[in-house]
Amino acid sequence: MGFWSKLFGRETADSKTLEVTPEEYKGYLIYPEPIAEGGQFRIAGRICKEYEGELKTHTFIRSDLLASKADATAFMVNKAKMFIDQTGDAMFR
């Protein structure tokens, strides 16, 4: 981890993966990973699925900021489910 990351408390991708429990939805795993920013939380996360023999990941960060980590987590999961319903496996192509 770099000097600035240590100084400002940034998490590594590996530490996030270990701490986040995914929610399963229609064969996809949803990992909510809100980003702390200016006293609020930016909606962010990953959608993963085994696709064509390998684990694929779709990562997104939205511009929305919410007051609590719990709200940002819940909003991300709902948005991810809607995205899965609308896009399906096409998100990995």
Image (tube, helix red, strand yellow):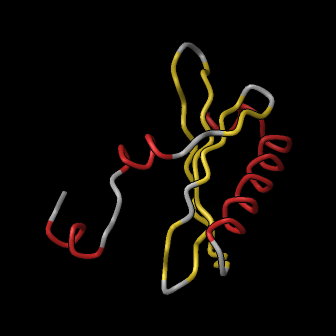
Question: Is residue 79 found left or right of 16 in the rendered image?
Answer: right
Q: Quadrant of residue 30?
A: top right
Along the line of sight, the residue nearer the viewer: 39 or 60: 39
Quadrant (top left/top right/bottom left/bottom right) for the C terminus: top right
Above or below, 74 against 29 in this view is: below
Q: Is residue 16 left or right of residue 40?
A: left
Name the residue at 35% across, 43% down.
14
Q: Name which residue lies at 33% across and 53% down.
A: 12
Which percent across, then down, holds residue 35?
51, 67
- Residue most extreme to the bottom: 38
Outermost top residue: 53
Q: Identify the residue shown where x is 19% and y is 57%.
A: 1
On the rendered structure, is 90 left or right of 86?
Answer: left
| Image spot of residue 22 (x, y percent) | 62, 39
- Residue at 60% from the left image edge and 34% from the top image edge: 48
* Quadrant assignment, res 25: top right
Residue 50 position in % (x across, y down): 60, 21
Residue 90, how many percent across, how many down? 71, 35
Q: Nearer the viewer, residue 90 or 32?
A: 32
- Numbered marks: total: 0
Residue 72 in the image: above or below residue 85: below
Q: Is residue 59 above or below residue 67?
A: above
